[in-house]
Amino acid sequence: MAVKVRIPFAIQSLFDGATEVEAEGRTVREIIDDLEKRYPGVKQRLCDDDGELRRFVNIFVNDQDIRSLKGLETELSEKDEIAIIPAIAGGVVR
Amino acid sequence: MQGHGWLRYHRQMLLKGWGEEGQRKLSNAHVAIVGVGGLGCPVALYLTAAGVGTLTLVDADAVEETNLNRQILHWQKDIGKPKVQSAVEKLLQFNPNVKIFPVHGQLKDETIEKWLRDANIIVDALDNFPTRLILNRYAVRTRKPLVHGAIYGWEGRATTILPYKTACLTCVFEEGPPPGVFPVVGTTPGTIAMIQATEVLKLLLGIGQPLLNRYLIYDGLMMTFHTVKIRRRPNCPVCGKF
Ligand SMILES: [Zn+2]
């Protein structure tokens, strides 16, 4: 199942400059794994060595923070929209 | 019209919810702007224009040539001058009604209370996360509204924090990104600064709907404004319940 993923400017360089991509998966974790296949290196930027979301990265499903849902196990349905939002502060996120 | 030099506020006083009473609220207010760079310069300029009575400006840096594409209160001749001094010089010429306290120094846990004690509202116009977290902790502890802005390249973010009522910065991001030199075009902090200044004016006047529990993401390249919902985390180390 494909869902839409919004990519903000700060991390577009990880996605060959794309502002929005489609990804396959039933959960947010599967979406990240799918993105990693097409954009190698993405997972390492978003997740730590244990595969958990880095503390300065937030992911929103339909504008809800997945930390307030089921985290990376949050289940998705067809029309869901995902946004990946890393903290920006004058820090290089690339 | 009350007060000398209030004719300059006439057009905004025509607004519903503003008037002489609203202008008096502004004139009695004290706003601290932390960081007098890309965000802080336009915020200070527009709050000065609007007649906010007292501003405290905090910044430890001196003006550098690489600042000049966006930090609009600092001009060619100011290179090497403390940013707070450069800003005060321009702002006092712009509107002599406004009192400005410049603080040339690094915000730390030990200094923050002394510098920000008298401010009613704090504007986060910083460029780094560690200082921002000190500011967030202080705002939460003292229950002062904090108007946050951040930028990266063509992208900007903003939210308004009312401690213990809305998500604080640590509720949203548990950690900051790794530090470094970042790209930025001047119009990005300009745009976010206008949102921050508007939020400050609304909070002072008590009108409208601030960016509460809403995290605004501006993309200048795509020209989109996207808002995601944020909320307090019960286990937030700054504003959560222990
Ligand atoms: Zn919090």
Image (cartoon, rainbow, N blue to C red):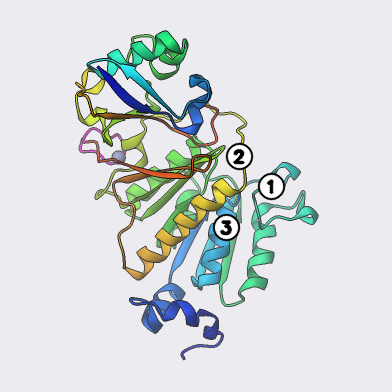
Which residue was labeled with disc 1?
B69
Quadrant of the image containing the C terminus of chain B: top left
Sequence-earlier tag: 1 or 2: 1
Q: Nearer the viewer, residue B198 or B96?
A: B198
- Do the residues at pointers 1 and 3 share their chain? yes
Which residue was labeled with disc 2?
B184
Place of residue B58 in the rendered image (x, y in percent of width and height, measured from the top left):
56, 53
Place of residue B196 in the rendered image (x, y in percent of width and height, measured from the top left):
45, 55
Sequence-earlier tag: 1 or 3: 3
Mark 3: few/some/many CA within 10 Å (<14, 14-19, 20+): many
Mark 1: few/some/many CA within 10 Å (<14, 14-19, 20+): some
Image: B167 above or below B18: above
> Which of the chains bears the disc numbered 1?
B
Instruction: For marks 1 and 3, give the CA distance.
Output: 13 Å
Q: Nearer the viewer, residue B51 or B137?
A: B51
Residue B38 appears anywhere in the view: no
Instruction: For marks 2 and 3, give the CA distance.
Output: 15 Å
Amino acid identity at mark 1:
Asn
**In the drawing, does residue B11 fall left or right of residue B181?**
left
Q: Is residue A81 magenta?
A: no
> Which of the chains bears the disc numbered 2?
B
Place of residue A10 in the rendered image (x, y in percent of width and height, measured from the top left):
50, 31
Amino acid identity at mark 2:
Val
- Do the residues at pointers 1 and 2 share their chain? yes
Q: Which quadrant would residue A50 be assigned to in this image?
A: top left
Q: Nearer the viewer, residue B239 or B185?
A: B185
Q: Secondary structure at mark 3?
A: helix
Which residue was labeled with disc 3?
B42
Whether residues under marks 1 and 3 lie with C-beta atoms below 8 angstroms apart, the answer is: no
Image: B120 above or below B168: below
